[in-house]
Image (cartoon, helix red, strand yellow):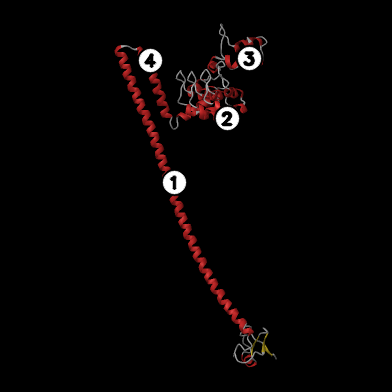
Amino acid sequence: MCAARGSTDIVALLEPYELGLRDSQGNTAGHIARALPRNSKEVAALLERDSPDNLALRFLPPAVDITPLMQAVIAGDREAFHAHLDETGRKDTDGRTALMYAAERGEVEFVRLLRTQELRTQDQEGRTALILAAQHGEVGCVKLLLEEADLENSRGESALDIAGSVGSKASHHTRCQCCARILRDDAGAGMGVGRHLSAAQRKLLTMQELSTAFSGDDAQHAENAFSNIIAELNFLRQLTEQQDRNTNAAEIAALQRRLEEKDAEVTAERQEHGRRIAELTAHLQERTDELERNLTTSLKTITTSRAVLQSSSCIVCLTNPKDTLLQPCGHLCACSNCAERIMNQTCPFCRTPIESVIKAYI
């Protein structure tokens, strides 16, 4: 009715809940809006996704007993969200949690804070937060909720199944395909085999329950066949888990060996550095001792020379008084007799060649 009247605001309000529904003649709201002579472009744009492929994407009608935390998530109110974080773990009447509301709306920040408390929770239809995020193409939320990838809804569909089933006409088809790639990559890594085996085992259990429709020998044969297959799958799952544990143990052992090798290398380098430091210390000590000896010898020479200069006796004969200046150095260090003998030689004190002498009267 709102589409027929061109009421854009009301269409926007009802679109999440009635998308894809048909009237008694099989027409959707999108068909009606586009068929009007004076159709509203805004209404037609809002209902672009209105197709059978998107029927599964309708939000459920508002549930009863929505907590203030869920209301904060729906409204995107961060202040109210943090004020009611103590309500994590509670469900509405449909079994939905605040994490599920956050996941389907792409509230990455809320999902990051709620997942530790509400992860791997399922509503009354078996849906998880990951399934809802994949259904709406919320890539960021899907990346945070991969630990739920092995869970399925009540129809046996996983998040990967849901993401891959979104039709190409849906506006968020590309984002859903991206979610599907992320889920496939996750399934192919690490515990992927174990997840598939667990899923196959659950499906066989469901088929086993359905086999009760058989009677007589057929029922017994079916029961035996299912029991054998389930036992084999259980064995394979346990074998896979053991292999994963062995792989992890091998990786840990390899890392331990690398750590020990690195530790040995560091120890060897420390020993080498210690040896070099000891050598340098010994060499420095030798040079210091040598320098000390040289300085001691020089000090003795200087002391002796100073004593000689301060003495009044001739430094050559050590008997007569000093009374002659040697030129050109000017040293008063010899008597007149010795000065004549060392003429044209060198000063006994500074080794400067003697050119002449001068008699000094003291």
Q: Position of residue 263 (x, y in %)?
A: 44, 49
The quarter of the picture where the N terminus appears is top right
- Going by the picture, which residue comes out furthest to the front? 86
Query: Left or right: 330 with respect to 150?
Result: right
Q: Earlier in the sequence, mark 3 or mark 2?
A: 3
Which of pointers 1 and 2 indicates the residue nearer the eye?
2
Q: CA distance from mark 1 to mark 4?
A: 55 Å
Q: Secondary structure at mark 1?
A: helix
Q: Position of residue 79 (x, y in %)?
A: 62, 28
Q: Earlier in the sequence, mark 3 or mark 4?
A: 3
Q: Residue at x 40, y 37 (%)?
A: 247
Q: Which mark is residue 11?
A: 3
Q: Quadrant of residue 141?
A: top right
Q: Secondary structure at mark 2?
A: helix
The quarter of the picture where the C terminus appears is bottom right
Q: CA distance from mark 3 to mark 1?
A: 64 Å
Q: Amino acid at mark 3?
A: Val
Q: Earlier in the sequence, mark 1 or mark 2?
A: 2
Which of pointers 3 and 2 indicates the residue nearer the eye?
2
Which of pointers 2 and 4 indicates the residue nearer the eye?
2
Q: From the image, tell me which residue sits under label 1.
A: 259
Q: Amino acid at mark 4?
A: Leu
Q: Which mark is residue 109?
A: 2
Q: From the image, tell me which residue sits under label 4.
A: 210
Relative vertical location of residue 280 with respect to residue 324 in this rendering, above or below: above
